[in-house]
Amino acid sequence: MLDIRPAPRGSRPAPRPTGVERTFAPDELIVSKTDPRGVISYANDVFLRVSGYDADEVLGQPHNLIRHPEMPRAVFKLLWDTLAARQEVFAYIDNLAADGAHYWVLAHVTPSYGANGAVVGYHSNRRRPAPSAVARVQPLYRALVAEERRQPTARAAVEASTRVLTETLVDRQQTYDDFVWSIINDEES
């Protein structure tokens, strides 16, 4: 289920990160829905505006269309593993817009169920995280990406960064959920 290949981007060339950060209003939500494979079936106007894509460029495309190359693969593995266990997940994610700008989100992703109880897709709401929350996440993510870059293959990169993520969280006596919620709770207090 983990798709780490570059996403097709239609007629537009793949964006290159520019280092320009984009943001959105604190009361706005970026919303998208996907099928069980992560192919986008719905994107709200905030998603389209912030990502810089038109609806026809994202609908039918893998959600990793907006994957920033500085995002650790281990976080996406954890996200997909959690969803495969039919659980919701909260994660801090840095996305890449069509023009190369990036934008941080606090994602809440949940499985969507059909009438028979089968997972028919996923629903994601993303809100703007506080800059201090991003500052707390970045050192861990940088360490994970650095470990990935030392590996010879994408598969080895995922395995290595997942191992580092697991060891880091064990050392902190936290799960990833605990880590995220500790940041959210600190921001809200």
Image (spheres, grey):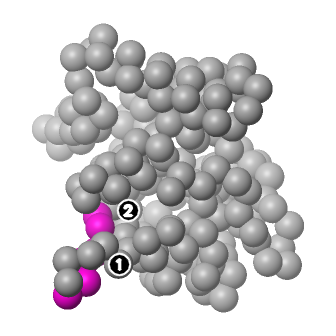
Magenta: main secondary structure equals strand
Q: Amino acid at mark 1?
A: Val
Question: Neighbour class for label 1 at 10 Å: few (<14), some, many (≥20)?
Answer: some
Q: Secondary structure at mark 1?
A: strand
* In the foreground, 125 or 160: 160
| Label 2 crowd bin: few (<14), some (14–19), many (20+), radius 10 Å | many
Picture quarter containing residue 22? bottom right
- Residue 159 visible? The answer is yes
The answer to whether one can see residue 183 in this image is no
Q: Which residues are magenta?
A: 110-115
| Name of the residue lying farthest toward the top | 171
Marks 2 and 1, how far apart at CA: 20 Å
Instruction: Identify the image quadrant of the C terminus.
Output: top left
- Which disc is residue 120 wearing? 1
* Up/down of 37 relative to 169, above or below: below
> Residue 61: image x %, image y %?
63, 75
Q: Nearer the viewer, residue 103 or 147?
A: 147
Q: Nearer the viewer, mark 2 or mark 1?
A: 1
